[in-house]
Amino acid sequence: MTSSTTTAAALPDQATRAGWLARAEPLRRLFARIPHSAIALLARFSIAAVFWSSGQTKAQGFALNLVSAEFQLGWPRLAPQAVDLFRDEYKLPLLPPELAATLAATAEHVLPVLLLLGLATRLSAAGLLGITLVIQLLAYPGAYATHGTWAALLLWLMARGAGVVSVDHWLAGRRR
């Protein structure tokens, strides 16, 4: 038996492949029925939670965490450890650590809220994607699997939008 005969024998014939495809078709149709709006809502909530949690580590005087039931209402201000983090660990070029920490803390609070509301979703996702790229390229290059997952969710939201459970959808309906 030659190697080409062995290879051909190991491959399933066309009829077998067609049978598998036919059996998988109902499952493919079922998955295709998952509404974009459900996927988008889950993506919006999940990625917003990641960035909100990160922003909370950079602020003091205001805490809002529904999962851990931590609530501290007050005037938010930049936590001193946030500046230390940007100066000692992240070491971003071009921006002073005080400015970088302030911008990051602000963006990590404002953009997730906009995502949760589904308001300016594509723009908010683009902003968070920019933050993700900075984190990946300049701060934690070894965390590409995590950052790739974030990027995939954000790109999905940028490409497809927030879905029907959103202020964006409501505003679009009012313009018609």
Image (cartoon, rainbow, N blue to C red):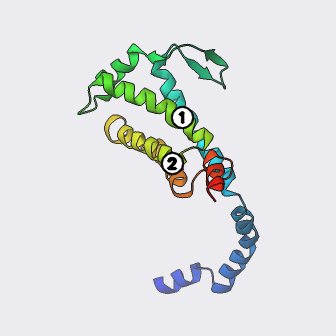
Of mark 1 and mark 2, the one earlier in the sequence is: 1
Question: Which residue is painted at 40% across and 43% down in the image?
Answer: 130
- Which of the 4 quarters of the picture holds residue 25? bottom right
Query: Which residue position holds label 1?
Result: 50
Q: Three-letter amino acid code at disc 2?
A: Leu
Q: Which mark is residue 84?
A: none
State whether residue 141 appears in this view: no
Secondary element under disc 2, as helix, strand or loop, is: helix
Q: Nearer the viewer, residue 21 or 55?
A: 55
Rounded to the nearest angstrom, the CA distance separating label 1 from label 2 is 12 Å
**In the rendered image of this protein, does residue 32 appear above or below residue 38?**
below
Taking 142 as reference, is 119 left or right? Answer: right
Q: Which mark is residue 154?
A: 2
Place of residue 143 in the rendered image (x, y in percent of width and height, measured from the top left) = 42, 40
Q: Three-letter amino acid code at disc 1?
A: Val
Q: Nearer the viewer, residue 11 or 120?
A: 120
Number of other residues with Cα within 10 Å of mark 2, as a class: few under 14, some 14 to 19, many 20 or more: many
Taking 109 as reference, is 64 left or right? Answer: right
State whether residue 159 appears in this view: yes
Question: Which residue is painted at 70% across and 67% down in the image?
Answer: 28
Cβ atoms at labels 1 and 2 below 8 Å apart: no
Question: Which residue is painted at 70% across and 75% down in the image?
Answer: 20
Taking 101 as reference, is 75 left or right? Answer: right
Question: Which residue is painted at 64% across and 60% down in the image?
Answer: 176
As drawn, the residue found furthest toward the left would be: 94
Number of other residues with Cα within 10 Å of mark 1, as a class: few under 14, some 14 to 19, many 20 or more: few
Secondary element under disc 1, as helix, strand or loop, is: helix
Place of residue 117 in the rendered image (x, y in percent of width and height, measured from the top left) = 62, 40
- Which of the 4 quarters of the picture holds residue 36? bottom right
